[in-house]
Image (cartoon, helix red, strand yellow):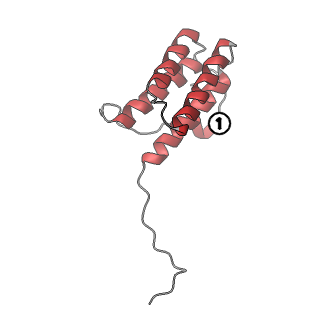
Amino acid sequence: MPAFPTPAASQLPIAYDRSAADPLGRILTAYDRAIRACESFDRRASREAIGTLRHALELDTPEARSFDSLYKWCEESVERHDYVAPARCLRTLRDAWHRAAQPRPIVPRADLPVS
């Protein structure tokens, strides 16, 4: 249970094989570590875990620079002893990465005419 209230949906465990050596599995594990550290109000562990996420970026794209800005904001928030906002931000990013990895079912469109 987290140290502070977060949206109910974020409390549901996400099934993912953490033993996998794939890059996405490592990213999700890094997010989990950062979220847990923030929820524990552990400044050192939070900074270290967020730093790991920042160092994993290659800053050669605008998207990577955007992620870096978010991580920097999280680090600055932790320095100001605000752990709630970074935990929520990191959980949102983690959930988005998890959803992006899920294959979408192919659903036929009923509104297209058959030729």
Percent across and percent down for residue 25 are 37, 34
Q: Residue 29, can we see it?
A: yes
Residue beneath disc 1: 7
Q: Residue 5 appears in which quarter of the rendering?
A: top right
Looking at the image, is 65 positioned above or below residue 73?
below
Q: Quadrant of the N terminus?
A: top right
Residue visible at 54% across and 25% down?
35
Q: Residue 63 appears in which quarter of the rendering?
A: top right
Percent across and percent down for residue 92 are 58, 37
Percent across and percent down for residue 50 are 52, 21
Looking at the image, is 17 positioned above or below residue 50?
below
Question: In the shown orientation, is residue 23 left or right of residue 66?
Answer: left
Residue visible at 50% across and 75% down?
109
Question: In the shown orientation, is residue 58 left or right of residue 79?
Answer: left
Residue visible at 39% across and 38% down?
16
The amino acid type, in three-letter code, at marker 1 is Pro
Looking at the image, is 109 positioned above or below residue 66?
below
